[in-house]
Every structure is written in structure tokens, then in C-alpha cells.
Image (cartoon, rainbow, N blue to C red):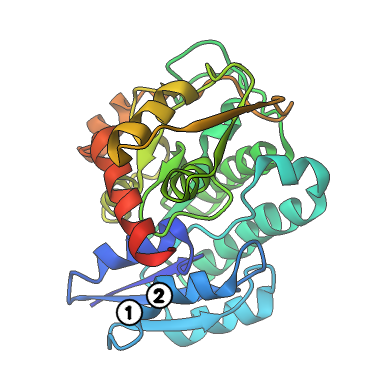
Amino acid sequence: MKSVLVTGGAGFIGSQTILRLLEDSEVKIICVDNFDDTYEREYKEENIEPFLNNSNFVLYEVDIVDREKLGEVFEKEKPTHVIHLAAKADTRNAVLNPHIYVDVNIVGTLNVFECSKEYKVENVVAASSSSVYGNNKNVPWSEDQKDILPISPYGTTKLSSEYLAYTYHRNFDMNITMLRYFNAYGENNRPGMVPYIWAEAMLTDHKIKISGDGERRRDYTYVGDIALGTILALWKPLGFEIINIGYGLPLSLNELVTLFEDATGNKAIVESRPSHPASVEETYANTSKAFDLLGWKPATSHEEGIKKLLNWFSNNRL
């Protein structure tokens, strides 16, 4: 039996990835999450509630920054594989509170790599982010682009994690794949993200706030597709690789509003707000490497994905 340790497993992408991993009865999941206060604890508990009676699932409430306690989990469970998703994720908050982002996203990642090295984990898949590209104008973004400058401490911590991953591969011959996720949305959506906020607004007749003129573009990618890409990478050790996981067709905020209107049959009440300096103008993934190395490509259209998000929100948040 393969045993997969998933950090951040009670979160948005983590819980959706675990859901799919547990479809295989030959896989044991070791979920590590500290249930931090980024958003309500009850939401994370709700995310993992379906797994608690599964004999192939075990939960540890541990902070990855705590090297000793994380090491105790590795010692007890001896995972064969690791999916490292735990992170502080909010570009705007990172500008205001950078120290906690460095602690969790860099020091925490270092601890995960150290434990994985010590316990001879076969393959590590870790979450990076499209934020590493900053405001690079050469779209769509490819993994081999060199002229990338993150514009928030969050993006900087993710780029630093990629460099750390390479050093562990080079010095200890570890298999580590860094996945640059693009603008996830869907079931178990993290509160505070635009798709979640807009789903709530559209279903409760509240205003939608749009940054600037609404032409800022994002490569929205359905979380189920992201989970599948993560699992494909997990079972295919590649030495060291960086791979984009994105839809490959960005939407403007105005276009996203139209999708929500079409899906709900409601007219959006739109209010403009100033743009934030830490927000990039466009995210846009070149996904050819994901297809070449993993056989992965997004399968869920924006229309279908937004309907899934709204259905989940209606059943779980209203």
C-alpha cells in the first residue's frame, strides 16, 4: 500500500485531492493541517468530514513550521509519497504581513523537504503558484521563462521554494515536482477568493466589486482538474521539474461576471474599486509541458466549473 502525506490536506485543493486519492483502496492518506485562522476552522473540518470514517485516512493537527512535531508524523507513518500544499496564500495580506509567509512558505517547506529526505520519500509534489511570474508580459507563461519577478512576498516565497526543491534534488537525488497552480476555483473554495465572493454575491443579490475597469484577466482553473494534475505528478517521479497547471485560456473579470450571470439567471450588481498594486494584470498558462510530461490537460470548461461552484455553494454555504 502506498501512503501519501498531504500537508494542508484540510484546505481547498488539499481536500479535493484527498477525495480523489481515496477512490483507490490501496492508498493511505496522512493528512497534516494546522487549521490556522486564515478562515473559519469549521470550513476545514467540513472539508475533511467525509474522510474521517475511512480506515485509509488519518489526521494530524500539526504545523509544518514545527520541525519536531512534523518529524514525529513522518517517523510514525513513514509515508512513501508527499503532496505539500500547506501555505499562507493571499497576495495582498502578504504585502502587509510578510514574516508569517516566509515562516510558513519557506521554513515550512524546508521542513517538509528535510523530513522527506530523512525518511526516503519516493516522490514529493509541492505547490508553487502562477504568482512567481509577476507581471511578465510574455504570455502565455512557460516554465522555462527566466525574466520573472514576483510582485508580492507570497510569490517570492513560492519562487524561493522552487529553488529549495532544486537544491534537494541536486544534493540528495530527490524526486520533487513543483506545480505552478493557476487561479483555482470550485468545490470547497477558500473564502476570500473572487469566485467564492462572487458566488455568494450572485446567490444573495449583493454587489460584486470589480478591480479597475474589469479587464484584468485570470487563468481560472477548476479544482478537480488541478487535483487530477497533482495526482498524475505524484505517481510519476521526474527528478526535478516545474510544471504549470492552468486552464490555458484567461478570462477578464467582466467575462467572469457574465458567466455567473448566465449560470444563475441573475443580473450582477457591479461596483468598481481601485486596483491593488500586488495584483498582476494577467495570468495565462502555457500547459504544453503538463500534457507532454503528465498527459494532463484541463477537462472542465469555465461554464461547467462555475455551475459546480454555485451548486456547492448553494448546498453548503446558504
User: In this view, which residue lies farthest toward the top?
Assistant: 138
Name the residue that disc number 2 marks.
48
Q: Is residue 69 in view? A: yes
x then y, percent, for residue 107? 70, 58
Left or right of residue 110, residue 28 in this image: left
Place of residue 106 in the rendered image (x, y in percent of width and height, measured from the top left): 68, 52
* Whether residue 205 is situated above or below residue 7 in the rendered picture: above
Q: Is residue 178 visible?
A: no
Q: Nearer the viewer, residue 91 or 211?
A: 211
The front one of 160 and 304 is 304
Q: Left or right of 293: which side holds 40?
A: right
Q: Is residue 297 left or right of residue 185?
A: left
Q: Amino acid at mark 1?
A: Phe
- Residue at 46% from the left image edge and 14% from the top image edge: 139
For badge 2, the amino acid type reads Ile
Query: How many labels, in total?
Result: 2
Element on which disc 1 rests: helix
Query: x%, y% of residue 67?
Result: 67, 73
The disc at residue 51 is: 1
Q: Which residue is depicted at the point 51% across and 19% down? A: 145
Q: Quadrant of the C terminus?
A: bottom left
- Residue contact between numbered discs 2 and 1, judged by CB atoms under 8 Å: yes
- Whole-number angstrom distance, CA of label 2 to CA of label 1: 5 Å
Q: Residues within 10 Å of mark 1 (few under 14, many from 20)?
A: some
Tag shown at residue 221: none
